[in-house]
Amino acid sequence: MTDRLNITELAALMKKGAGITVDPDEMEQRPDTPFEVYGLDSLGLLGIVGELENRYARPLPPDADRCKTPREFLDLVNNSLMAGA
């Protein structure tokens, strides 16, 4: 398992945690599209943060659930994971 979260995994987490189906290729082409355009609200993002914290057995930064775009979220999460590696 990689220690870096990617767009495909994020799309799967959005489906699992919030019931939102997102095409990972589309999200990869437009990583600065706000989560709200995809239908993901802050509560849904909070669920994804919780899932990742369980997966990696460590807390993510407290502002992770306030990220507005997939790029911002992936950068924050991956920087946090790399710092803790």
Image (cartoon, rainbow, N blue to C red):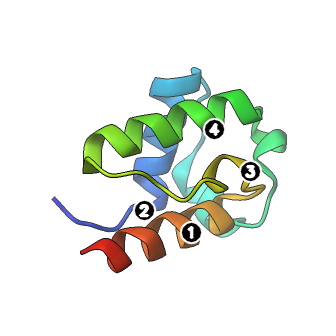
Which-is-in-front pick, marks 3 and 2? 3
Label 1: few (<14), some (14–19) or many (≥20) C-alpha neighbours in 10 Å: some
Residue 40 in view in this figure: no
- Name the residue type under label 2: Asn
Expressed as whole percent of the image width and height from the top left, the position of residue 9 reads: 40, 49
Which-is-in-front pick, marks 2 and 1? 1
Q: Secondary structure at mark 4?
A: helix
Name the N-terminal-most of marks 3 and 4: 4
Expressed as whole percent of the image width and height from the top left, the position of residue 5 reads: 39, 61
Residue bearing mark 1: 76
| Residue at x 66%, y 46% (from the top left corner) | 65
Residue bearing mark 4: 45
Q: Quadrant of residue 2?
A: bottom left
Name the N-terminal-most of marks 2 and 4: 2
Residue bearing mark 3: 66
Name the N-terminal-most of marks 2 and 1: 2
Name the N-terminal-most of marks 3 and 1: 3
Residues at marks 3 and 1, CA–CA distance in whole angstroms = 11 Å
Quarter of the rendering occupied by the N terminus: bottom left
- Name the residue type under label 3: Arg
